Amino acid sequence: MRLARFLWNSPNTLLGLAFALLAAPLGVRFRKGAGTLDVLSHPLVLRGCAITLGVVVCYGPGAAPERPLKNGHSFADHERQHVRQGERLGPFYLPLHLATGVWAMLRDGRWHGPANRLEAGPLASPPRPWA
């Protein structure tokens, strides 16, 4: 079952690897996370933010997997929930995440607000894929 989820999420992972390798000459650091490949100090990710594509998590400058969030859990705990979402949604993950993010921005001006269905669960305490 885990292999099937990994394969279903593989288009996102390939995109994540390409995005990570794009910044490799710019001094990013790679490290193994808990079921993820963490890319640290990615210069194309906003400061203090992260982007999860498949099992690749790209942290922007000033962001770290161990950084605590407002819910008391780590940034990595939050991003792992996006990995789980990708395992279930496969190639639909990225378009759905963009659509729900844009909807949330239009609705209340906050990407990470309650209107973004793909952020509500990861921001919960404890973090989970779905609200």
Image: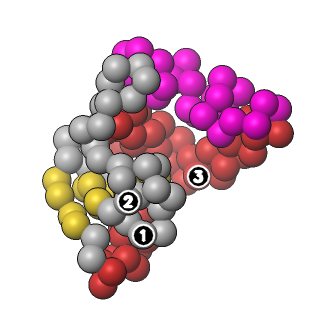
Q: Which residue is mark 1?
A: 43
Residue lying farthest to the bottom in this orientation: 25
In terms of depth relative to the viewer, which is nearer, 72 or 97?
72
In the rendered structure, find residue 61 and report the number of the disc placed on it. 2
Residue at 46% over, 56% down: 47
Q: Is residue 67 above or below residue 37?
A: above
Residue range highlighted in magenta: 107-131
Q: Which residue sits at x=28%, y=43%?
A: 65
Secondary structure category for the residue under label 3: helix
In three-dimensional space, the C-alpha distance between marks 1 and 3, rounded to whole angstroms, equals 20 Å
Disc 3 marks which amino acid? Answer: Leu
Q: State whether residue 76 is above or below residue 44.
A: above
The amino acid type found where label 2 is placed reads: Pro
**Proximity of marks 1 and 2: CB atoms separated by less than 8 Å:** yes
Which labelled disc corresponds to residue 97?
Answer: none
For the residues labelled 3 and 2, the Cα–Cα distance comes to 22 Å
Residue 94's disc is 3
Q: Main secondary structure of the magenta part?
A: loop
Tell whether position 130 is magenta: yes
